[in-house]
Amino acid sequence: MTKDYLPVIGDVEDPRKIEHIYVCRLAYMQCRSQRDRLLSGGSYSPHPRWDGGTTDGKIHRSYWIGISQFLGRVGANPYASYEVLFREKATWSAPPPPGTVSDFNLIPEYKAATDDIHRTVYNGLLTDSSLAKSRVTTYQSMGETRKQSVLSALAHPHSQLSPLFGYCLALSEGLSDVAAELQLVATAQYFRYRTDYDKVWEHVLPLEMCTMPVEERIAFLRKLNK
């Protein structure tokens, strides 16, 4: 198979549409990978023809373009939608193919899950903030400086801080090396619910993340999709 992108975007030119196509693919990959790890411990990569391109002289249109168009029309978040799909349609032996997300019967559930994202993002911020404060306070009471205590909290073997919050905390304390280690996985978390994170975490997120140009977002998504 030959292709220029993962996935092939064909004649799609609008950068925001391209971004959404990558998000749809990444959402399916993460849901499928999570299922496969639980069942077999294996990794997952989508079937090549789903990405489009050419196989044995046959040209395939990327599945993800149509999926992006469908979810965009119904106003459903790709991650929320695929989580619903895997919950409703996955069996032990047969995970749902990506195109089955275009199930009109599941649209109400996709929309309900999408509407619930704001609450999920808000509760996540409360949980992360409370846990970080508790851990930092504990280490400071043991004689560590503020920066040392933050580093200890981030390095805690049982740390339950989300990657995105850990990344933001590391940046705020000038721990650039730690932030660099967390950047890719933190950005992946951010892309799940970017619009809601921008609204709810606006005083936590670094400005360069919230104002990242769409071309840079696409570059990050390409890294995450490989």
Image: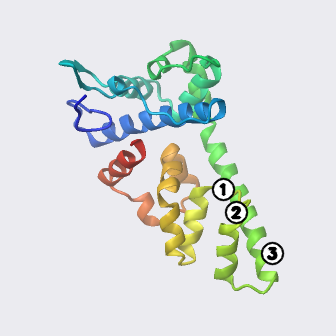
Report the Cα–Cα distance between label 3 and label 1.
20 Å
Viewer-closest of 226 and 98: 226
Asked whether the residues under the numbered discs 3 and 1 touch, taking CB atoms below 8 Å apart as contact, a structural biologist would say no
Asked whether the residues under the numbered discs 1 and 2 touch, taking CB atoms below 8 Å apart as contact, a structural biologist would say yes
Mark closer to the chain start, 3 or 2: 2
Q: Residue at x 49, y 31 (%)?
A: 28
Left or right of 193, for residue 8: left
Left or right of 52, for residue 124: right
Q: Is residue 166 above or below residue 13?
A: below
Left or right of 84, for residue 195: left
Q: Residue at x 48, y 60 (%)?
A: 183
Q: Residue at x 51, y 64 (%)?
A: 181
Viewer-closest of 87 and 18: 87
Report how many numbered discs are placed on residues in the image.
3
The residue at which mark 1 appears reads as 125
The amino acid marked with disc number 1 is: Leu
Mark closer to the chain start, 3 or 1: 1
The residue at which mark 2 appears reads as 129
